Image (cartoon, rainbow, N blue to C red):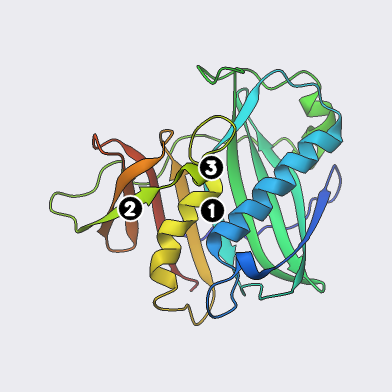
């Protein structure tokens, strides 16, 4: 897996700032902010940006892919600032890039692909009217593709371990919230705390419900599969070069 390209703030256009603090519920036993906490702050920044923009939107947005590069993990009681902006567009989806900063230092950057769906989530819908006027300047005309990059299926005989999604993991749509998937990687990171930076990527392939699941592994790749074998997400993590 290649780490996501370095994120820089756009020279012009809308940049939204979301501020938060690392608290007890966000950290590993070592006091390091967990990957699922980072994903939640990025999700919150996107949500508050959308509400603050004044954009009238009859559809819903879902994350298709999140690439995260952590140069240094935030730690307990750090005050963080998430600067987020639109960095690319297409007719049915858009790319959102973010910087996670603490005391003026960039600790992590992220690039996420969000697909715009009809309200019922049945199929993609064109970007809402007025989107380009609000978000298009920062994208600087950059077009993005939505094709997933990870292998769709694990190899035969890949080692497997049991996983369980809780009812508390579900969001308003009744599906497992995007931020929860990072916990599958955290299960391994907590046992062997990263000594340096980390590059992680999650691709969401199907909605997941509460209940039993399976995590299959092959090298740095992980596949999360529902009981019927459907791969709902693929994940990978590796030290930053």
For image coordinates 55% across by 49% down, the residue present is: 179
Name the secondary structure under disc 3.
Answer: loop
Labels 1, 2: front one: 2
Give the CA separation, mark 1 to mark 2. Answer: 23 Å
The answer to whether residue 203 is left or right of residue 43 is left
Give the left or right position of residue 47, taking residue 205 as reference. right
Disc 1 to disc 3, C-alpha distance: 17 Å
Q: Is residue 5 visible?
A: no
Q: Residue at x 55, y 29 (%)?
A: 173
Q: Secondary structure at mark 2?
A: strand
Residue 189: % across, % down: 43, 71
Q: Name the residue: 60% across, 36% down.
A: 114
Q: Mark 1 — residue? A: 67
Label 1 secondary element: strand
Rendered view: 224 above or below 32: above
Quarter of the image that includes the N terminus: bottom left
User: Marks 1 and 3: CB-CB under 8 Å?
Assistant: no
In the rendered view, does 124 fall on the left or right side of 223? right
Residue of label 2: 163
Q: Please rate how many residues cluster around mark 3, counting C-alpha atoms within 10 Å: few if below 14, some from 14 to 19, many from 20.
A: some
Residue 241 image point, x, y percent: 48, 74
User: Where in the figure is residue 168, as x and y percent of width and height?
Assistant: 52, 45
Q: Position of residue 72 (x, y in %)?
A: 62, 75
- Whether label 1 touches label 2, CB < 8 Å: no
Q: Earlier in the sequence, mark 1 or mark 2?
A: 1
Position of 199 with respect to 221 (left or right) is: right
Using the image as rendered, state which of residue 41 and residue 8 is in the foreground.
41
- Disc 3 designates what residue? 177
In primary-sequence order, the first of circles 1 and 3 is 1
The residue most toward the left is 157
């Amino acid at each position: 897996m290649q780490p996501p390209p370095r994120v820089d703030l756009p020279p012009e256009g809308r940049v939204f700032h979301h501020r938060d603090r690392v608290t007890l519920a966000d950290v590993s036993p070592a006091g390091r902010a967990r990957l699922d906490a980072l994903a939640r702050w990025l999700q919150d920044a996107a949500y508050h940006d959308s509400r603050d923009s004044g954009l009238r939107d009859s559809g819903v947005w879902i994350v298709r892919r999140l690439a995260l590069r952590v140069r240094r993990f935030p730690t307990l009681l750090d005050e963080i600032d998430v600067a987020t902006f639109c960095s690319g567009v297409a007719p049915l989806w858009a790319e959102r890039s973010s910087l996670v900063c603490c005391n003026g230092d960039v600790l992590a950057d992220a690039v996420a692909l969000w697909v715009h769906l009809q309200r019922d989530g049945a199929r993609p819908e064109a970007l809402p009217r007025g989107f380009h006027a609000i978000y298009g300047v920062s994208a600087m005309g950059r077009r993005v593709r939505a094709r997933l990059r990870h292998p769709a299926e694990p190899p035969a005989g890949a080692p497997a371990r049991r996983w369980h999604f809780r009812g508390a993991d579900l969001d308003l749509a009744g599906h497992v919230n995007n931020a929860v998937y990072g916990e599958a990687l955290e299960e391994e990171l907590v046992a062997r705390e990263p000594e340096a930076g980390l590059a992680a990527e999650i691709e969401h392939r199907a909605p997941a419900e509460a209940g039993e699941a399976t995590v299959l592994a092959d090298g740095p790749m992980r596949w999360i599969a529902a009981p019927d074998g459907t791969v709902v997400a693929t994940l990978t993590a590796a030290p930053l070069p």
